[in-house]
């Protein structure tokens, strides 16, 4: 009975540890995270052998920044201009009128979007605040206030004397 319980205990311990043994022995392989893998420029032998080795952790001079890499993929050139176009691409751009594009199109789009957003905001305010709310704020009439302040200064009166003129809302 003692041998049986010892064997049962050893079997249970082996069964519980078998889960981790495969990882310990390297039987379960996990591949690299494909989103963390970066391709590096190939190593080349420099023509000048007097160069010093790079500092550990320094940025590689031949490594292209991801932003520049994306720009090159989208525009077909590092500078983002029309350089490097083939004859077919140039013909397509000229036929579609792409060469006559307004350079201020972003400003125009922003302006049109702002106008639409303003109309939508006013409509939303009308829907949410449909009751007329009384405001306690008043708007000062700048010209009349300036005139009142000049008159008080000319007569030697304190600036706080007199009533502040306000703009009456309709």
Image: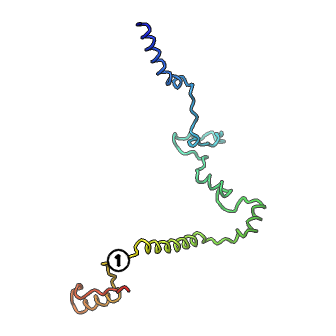
Residue 49: give x, y in percent of width and height: 63, 39
Above or below, 130 against 19 in this view is below
Q: Quadrant of the N terminus?
A: top left
Residue, x 51% and y 24% (percent of image)? Answer: 24
Residue 78: give x, y in percent of width and height: 65, 56
Residue 149: give x, y in percent of width and height: 28, 88
Residue with the mark numbered 1 = 133
Circle 1: is it few (<14), some (14-19), or many (20+) Cα within 10 Å? Answer: few
Residue 90: give x, y in percent of width and height: 75, 64
Residue placed most toward the observer, 51 or 70 = 70
In the shown orientation, is residue 119 left or right of residue 145? right
Residue placed most toward the observer, 170 or 158 = 170
Q: Quadrant of the C terminus?
A: bottom left
Residue placed most toward the observer, 9 or 32 = 9
Would you identify the image quadrant in which residue 68 lies? bottom right
Kindly state the secondary structure of the residue where label 1 is placed.
loop
Residue, x 54% and y 73% (percent of image)? Answer: 111
Colouring rule applied to residues: rainbow
Residue, x 62% and y 52% (percent of image)? Answer: 69
Above or below, 136 against 23 in this view is below
Residue placed most toward the observer, 133 or 83 = 133
Residue, x 55% and y 25% (percent of image)? Answer: 26
Above or below, 148 against 133 in this view is below
């Amino acid at each position: 009975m003692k041998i049986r319980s010892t064997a049962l205990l050893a079997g249970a311990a082996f069964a519980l540890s078998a889960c981790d043994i495969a990882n310990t022995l390297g039987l379960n392989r996990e591949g690299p995270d494909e989103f963390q893998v970066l391709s590096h420029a190939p190593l080349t032998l420099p023509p000048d052998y007097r160069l010093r080795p790079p500092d550990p952790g320094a940025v590689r001079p031949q490594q292209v920044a991801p932003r520049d890499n994306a720009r090159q993929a989208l525009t077909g050139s590092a500078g983002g201009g029309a350089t490097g176009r083939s004859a077919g691409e140039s013909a397509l751009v000229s036929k579609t009128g792409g060469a006559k594009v307004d350079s201020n199109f972003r400003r125009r789009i922003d302006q049109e979007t702002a106008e639409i957003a303003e109309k939508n905001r006013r409509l939303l305010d009308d829907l949410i605040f449909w009751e007329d709310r009384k405001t306690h704020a008043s708007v000062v009439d700048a010209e009349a206030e300036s005139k009142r302040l000049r008159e008080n200064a000319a007569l030697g009166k304190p600036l706080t004397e007199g009533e502040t003129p306000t703009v009456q809302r309709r």
